[in-house]
Image (cartoon, grey):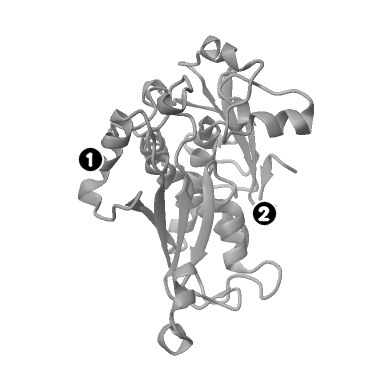
C-alpha cells in the first residue's frame, strides 16, 4: 500500500502539508518499550533545521508538538497500535492559490493529478517534505528499540554542491540563498551493530531494503553503498575488500556505510516560484535518512 511502510513494524503515514495535521500509526511495536520523548523532540528539531539559516521559514515556525492518541501509557508502549499526530500550526494555503491552474517544474504537481485526477495544490499536499515529520517520530521509536539491541545509526551531511568541507557548508548555502537559488547535497549514513546474517540473498537484499526506504524520501535521487559509483573507475584488485558492510545482500557484521544524494529544491525565487522553501533540503534530510534506515532495519531484524 502506498502509504504504509513495513510488515513487522508497520508505519502508516497520513496528512497533507497545509491540512489540519500530519501523523502516523505504528503497529507491531512490542509492549514494554520505554519511549524517550525528549529524543523524539530533538529529532524533530533537527528535521526542522531551527538552527539552520537556509532552512524553510515554515519549518522553523512549526512547533511540531506530538499528540499521542493511543498505544502509549505513562511513557511505555502497550503493544497496541501507536497513533500520533502533529498539528499544522503555520499552514498558509492561501499562499498557493496561484498553483490551482499551473504546475511547478520539478515537483509532483502534474503527476499527482495524472494519477488521481485531482491534486492538493496547497504546497504540494502529501508530496511536501512536511510529511517526513511523521517518519521521524516513527523512526525515532524504531531507533530506540534498535539501540537496545546494540545497533546505532548515524548520518551526516558530507557534501553541499561541490563543497566537501563541513565548515564551509553554511557559507555555500547562504551564497545560493542570497542569489535566490538552491543547491543539493550528499548524506552519508553509518550503521553499527547489525548482526551478521541480516538480510536475504536474492530479492530482499539488505542494501535493496535500505535503498527502498531511503529513496522514498522527498528529493532523494540516488543511493550507493560500499564502493558505489566511484568504484567503476578502479580495478577490482584495489576495491574488492570494500563491501560497505554487506556481501551478497547479507550483513557481514562490520559497519554498514551508504550514501544518498538530494537534489536542489526546484522551487526558488530565481525560478520565479513563490513560497517558503529550503536553500538546501539535504541539511534537514539527515534525521529523515536515519529514521527510514531504522524502520527498514527493525523490519528485517
Which residue position holds label 2? 8
Left or right, 6 with respect to 183, comes to: right
Which numbered circle lies on residue 244? Answer: none
Disc 2 crowd rating (10 Å Cα; few below 14, some 14-19, many 20+) is some
For the point 44% across and 62% down, the residue is: 151
- Kindly indicate the quadrant of the structure image that contains residue 138: top right
Residue 90 visible, this orientation = yes
Q: Quadrant of the N terminus?
A: top right
Q: Nearer the viewer, residue 247 or 235?
A: 235
Q: Nearer the viewer, mark 2 or mark 1?
A: 1
Q: Nearer the viewer, residue 130 or 236?
A: 236
Q: Position of residue 281 (x, y in %)?
A: 42, 39
Q: Assign a secondary structure to mark 1.
A: helix
Q: Are marks 2 and 1 in contact (CB under 8 Å)?
A: no
Q: Nearer the viewer, residue 288 or 221?
A: 221
Give the answer, above or below, for where 236 lies relative to 66: below
Q: Assign a secondary structure to mark 2.
A: loop
In the image, farthest residue toward the left: 167
Give the answer, above or below, for where 249 lies relative to 71: below
Give the answer, above or below, for where 63 lies relative to 45: above
Which residue position holds label 1? 171
Q: Position of residue 289 (x, y in %)?
A: 47, 49
For the point 51% across and 46% down, the residue is: 139
For the point 56% across and 19% down, the residue is: 18
In the image, farthest residue toward the bottom: 237
For the point 60% across and 78% down, the residue is: 248
- Kindly indicate the quadrant of the structure image that contains residue 55: top left
Q: Nearer the viewer, residue 108 or 199?
A: 108
Amino acid at each position: 500500500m502506498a502509504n504504509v511502510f513495513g510488515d513487522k513494524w508497520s508505519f502508516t503515514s497520513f496528512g497533507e502539508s497545509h491540512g489540519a495535521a500530519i501523523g502516523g500509526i505504528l503497529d507491531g511495536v512490542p509492549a514494554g518499550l520505554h519511549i524517550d520523548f525528549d529524543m523524539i523532540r530533538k529529532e524533530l528539531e533537527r528535521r526542522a533545521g531551527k538552527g539552520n539559516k537556509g532552512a524553510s521559514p515554515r519549518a522553523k515556525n512549526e512547533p511540531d508538538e506530538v499528540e499521542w492518541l493511543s498505544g502509549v501509557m505513562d511513557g511505555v508502549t502497550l503493544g497496541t497500535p501507536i497513533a500520533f499526530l502533529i498539528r499544522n500550526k503555520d499552514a498558509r494555503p492561501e499562499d498557493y492559490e496561484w498553483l490551482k491552474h499551473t504546475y511547478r517544474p520539478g515537483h509532483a504537481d502534474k503527476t499527482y493529478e495524472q494519477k488521481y485526477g485531482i491534486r492538493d495544490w496547497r504546497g504540494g499536499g502529501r508530496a511536501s517534505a512536511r510529511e517526513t515529520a511523521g517518519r521521524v517520530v516513527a523512526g525515532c521509536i524504531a531507533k530506540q528499540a534498535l539501540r537496545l539491541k546494540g545497533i546505532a545509526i548515524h548520518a551526516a551531511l558530507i557534501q553541499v554542491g561541490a563543497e566537501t568541507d563541513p565548515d564551509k557548508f553554511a557559507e555555500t548555502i547562504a551564497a545560493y540563498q542570497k542569489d535566490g537559488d538552491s543547491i543539493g547535497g550528499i548524506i552519508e549514513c553509518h550503521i553499527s551493530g547489525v548482526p551478521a546474517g541480516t538480510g536475504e540473498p536474492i530479492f530482499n537484499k539488505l542494501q535493496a531494503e535500505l535503498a527502498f526506504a531511503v529513496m522514498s524520501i522527498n528529493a532523494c535521487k540516488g543511493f550507493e553503498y560500499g564502493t558505489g559509483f566511484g568504484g567503476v573507475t578502479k580495478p577490482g584488485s584495489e576495491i574488492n575488500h570494500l563491501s560497505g558492510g554487506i556481501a551478497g545482500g547479507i550483513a557481514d557484521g562490520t559497519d554498514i556505510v551508504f550514501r544518498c544524494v538530494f537534489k536542489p529544491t526546484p522551487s526558488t525565487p530565481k525560478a520565479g516560484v513563490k513560497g517558503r522553501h529550503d536553500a538546501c533540503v539535504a541539511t534537514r534530510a539527515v534525521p529523515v535518512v536515519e529514521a527510514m534506515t531504522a524502520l527498514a532495519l527493525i523490519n528485517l531484524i
